[in-house]
Image: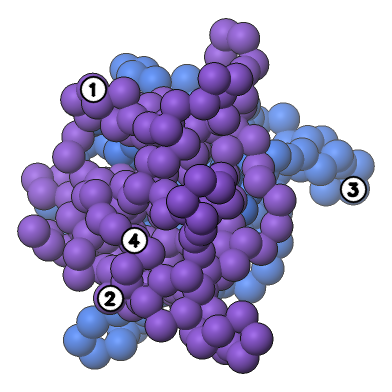
Chain colours: A purple, B blue
């Protein structure tokens, strides 16, 4: 189902614009725990099977920004390193993970966020694109659960469009 | 009425996060034309009577960012220059007006946006604060209407909080 930019039945100006904490606490955590979600706005997809430009049409909604749940693909069957190749290229992290801290109560780390850029081609011969992805995951537990480790929520966008949005907010 | 950060009855992650165009087309234009608005989310206030830190509790909702309709105050009874003094200080523009262009159809200028910072004290002896305001207005018409010229929509926020929000989005 594709319903365009606006979530159905919302007045103009209202949209799904979650904080990192909301995305972790209300969506990813419940998804991982197989609990019901507050709203059906994030589709599940095998993200690493596709090029980013083929993903927007697979999202439940979105225009400049899209959200997906995706299982993590492991690079090696028994290894913990994630597989980052996707479609005709690969996703590459742009920096360190950012910890997402609970804003109330005990200031625990409730999630981790990583920014990635999509490159076409192979690592030794590639071309950077303007497709950017934020990957949110639950913290690795002392006794890791395959389930926790494998399900991620993805927020991705073409950076040029996104910067336009950002300019709109800032100026 | 104060209803906290989230608009009533919205699932977590949904909020009023309008584009400049949505704010002009769906809210300010209809307000100026005395038409009904798509949602009652923007309260009307005499903005220049208050210090910015007294305004959040007067908004219909909001946490890091608040919206108001406000009439423009003229500096001189018959002049066109706006009055910028407010509460214990004054608002000062930080740059040129930004034109807001219609995204579809004829690419008309549908509105103007100005960023302002609040200073306490008097122009000759003042202290800059971290309160920032975006002022949206309809374009001046060839045959100006007092009504068009006088009603503005305001979006304001403490810049430190806002920059935190911005970081959440970008990283």
Camera-near label (2 vs 4) is: 4
Q: Are marks 2 and 3 on the same chain?
A: no
Query: Helix, strand or loop at disc 2?
Result: helix
Q: Residues within 10 Å of mark 1 (few under 14, many from 20)?
A: few
Residue of label 4: A47
Q: Residue at x 22, y 50 (%)?
A: A43
**Chain holding disc 4:** A
Residue of label 2: A54
Task: Note whether A144 is above or below A150 in the view shown.
Answer: above
Q: Are marks 2 and 4 on the same chain?
A: yes
How far apart, in angstroms, are the residues tagged by discs 3 and 4? 58 Å
Camera-near label (1 vs 3) is: 1
Q: Residue at x 19, y 25 (%)?
A: A36
Task: Note whether A169 is above or below A98 in the view shown.
Answer: below
Q: Are marks 1 and 3 on the same chain?
A: no
Image-based side of A46 in relation to A123, left or right: left
Query: Helix, strand or loop at disc 3?
Result: loop
How far apart, in angstroms, are the residues tagged by discs 1 and 3? 60 Å
Query: Helix, strand or loop at disc 4?
Result: helix
Q: Which of the two discs, 2 and 4, labels the residue nearer the N terminus? A: 4
**Chain holding disc 1:** A
Mark number displayed over residue B124? 3
């Amino acid at each position: 189902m594709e319903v365009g930019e606006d979530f159905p039945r919302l007045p103009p100006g209202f949209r799904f614009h979650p904080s990192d904490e909301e995305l972790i606490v209300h969506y990813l955590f419940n998804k991982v725990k197989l609990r019901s979600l507050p709203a059906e706005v994030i589709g599940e997809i095998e993200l690493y099977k596709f090029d980013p430009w083929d993903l927007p049409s697979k999202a439940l909604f979105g225009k400049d920004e899209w959200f997906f749940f995706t299982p993590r693909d492991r690079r090696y069957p028994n290894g913990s390193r994630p597989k980052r190749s996707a479609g005709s290229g690969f996703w590459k992290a742009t920096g360190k993970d950012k910890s997402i801290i609970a804003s109330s109560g005990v200031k625990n780390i409730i999630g981790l966020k990583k920014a990635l850029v999509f490159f076409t081609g192979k690592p030794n011969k590639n071309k950077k694109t303007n497709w950017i992805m934020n990957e949110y995951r639950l913290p690795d537990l002392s006794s890791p659960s395959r389930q926790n480790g494998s399900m991620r929520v993805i927020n991705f966008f073409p950076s040029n469009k996104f910067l336009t949005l950002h300019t709109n907010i800032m100026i």
